Structures are given as structure tokens and as C-alpha cells.
Amino acid sequence: MAKMILSMDGLVLKEIPLAKERMTIGRKPHNDIQIDNLAISGEHAAVVTILNDSFLEDLNSTNGTLVNGQPVKKHFLKNGDVVELGKYKLKYIAEQSAAAGDSPDFEKTMVMRSNMLRPAAEPAPAASASASAAQPAPPAAAAPVQAQPPAAIQILSGSNAGRELELTKSLTTLGKPGVQVAVIARRPHGYFITHVEGAQFPVVNGKALDAQAHPLADHDVIEIAGVKMEFFLKT
């Protein structure tokens, strides 16, 4: 489990496991990570953790949030990153963050763009089924590690209407950075959508979500950054 190490002036104050999908940082007592200092806003920042990945978002704080000395509004946290809030520092430690052979972190996410979308695939002809039965399937055709059926998003509105985006990664990021961003995570027990960035939360089947992860069902209609799309299982 990833964690953050809180320190001030080189003195470690405590370690905080990132045990929740969304943890807030701020001066007020209701925050998951409370820092009682006037330089810290009441709700200063939030950390969203999905699977082995964590995102930091500044919640329009008065004095801002720095990561490795640079001001950020939203930042994909990497092992060893140092978050600075006033005189306090939070070092991000991603335990077991990258097993041997894993792809780089940035390959786990993708922002929806027209060149990443493709027309929906035509159904495979019936003859292909008999052909595959006549010879053993290659190793790549084995069941996914997460034991979930493949899924995809079909765009319903906008210039990319009718296009399809397959959810082949463990994390797929959808939306427009700086406007509204959500993440769809593929887990052993299903697909879940979580709000990451923006004042407005994603809408599923006409209902706005909250900060918690929301399970997706076949043919759910999602609206993110003004674009409607349909989630469906490719069974």
C-alpha cells in the first residue's frame, strides 16, 4: 500500500497509509490528513488512489501546492515525489509500485483523443469461430489476469460520435484536463469509474456521482466534460 511521510524541517512527524480512494489534506479536523497550520487551507489538496496509482489535486488552496518544488494543480504521483504545503512536506512512497517487466506509469493511463478512438469493430464472421475451434488458441488469447470480460466505451455525442475506445489498460483516463477528468479502473470484481479532476462530477445514467468509486454496469451511459458515452462489455 502506498503511503505519505509527513515531515517539517527534516523531522518526520508521521506516516500516513493511503488506505482510502480519496484522502483530503487540510487544516480542518475533518480532513483525512490534518495539518493544523494557518498556511494550510481548510481543504488544501486531495490524493486519489486507484490500484497502484495516485493522483494529487490542489483544491484551489490559498497558498498553492508544490511537487518537487514546482506548483501543480493536478499531478500523477511517482515514487519519491515530495509534496510541499507551506513548511510541511509529504513524501510519496509507492511500495511495490513497479514489478519487473511492468510498463511505465504513463502507459497505464490515456486521455481520450480522436486519434486514440476507432470505429466499432465489425462482428467476427461465423466461419472464424469454427476455424479457431480447429486449432488451439495462441497464449495471447488466454483469459485476462483480472478475470474480467473485455469492455469498451462508445462515444455517443460530439465529433467522435460512433467511435469506440477499448478499455485495455488497468486504468483509462477520460475527459479534458483542466475541465473534467475521470478514471475507469479495471479490477478483479468489475469496472469502476472515479472522479479525479474538475468542479463537476461525472454523470452516470443521468445521476451525478460523488467522490467515491462507482461500479459500471453493461450499457451504462456516462457523461464527462460534455461528452456522452456508453460503457459496454464485449462478450
Image (cartoon, rainbow, N blue to C red):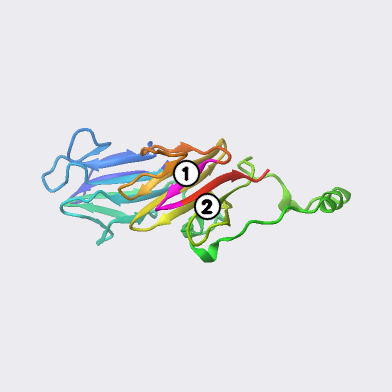
Where in the figure is residue 198, as x and y percent of width and height? 32, 50
Q: Position of residue 177 (x, y in %)?
A: 37, 58
Query: In what quadrant of the picture does the C terminus appear?
Result: top right
Q: Which residues are magenta?
A: 220-227
The reply, left or right, for residue 162 in relation to residue 80 is right
Residue at 33% across, 58% down: 178
Residue type marked 1:
Leu
Total numbered labels placed on residues in the image: 2
In the picture, which quadrant includes the N terminus? top left
Local SS, label 1:
loop
Provide the secondary structure element on which disc 2 rests. loop
Q: How far across and down, in percent of the image, does residue 158 sit?
A: 47, 58
Mark 1 — residue?
Answer: 51
Query: Which residue corresponds to mark 2?
Result: 156
- How far apart, in angstroms, are the residues tagged by discs 2 and 1? 28 Å
The crowd level at tag 1 (other Cα within 10 Å; few <14, some 14-19, many 20+) is some
Labels 2 and 1: the sequence-earlier one:
1
Give the left or right position of residue 131, taking residue 235 as reference: right
Residue displayed at 63% across by 44% down: 145
Give the residue at x 36% y 37%: 210
Q: Residue furthest bottom?
A: 115
* Residue 221: in magenta span: yes
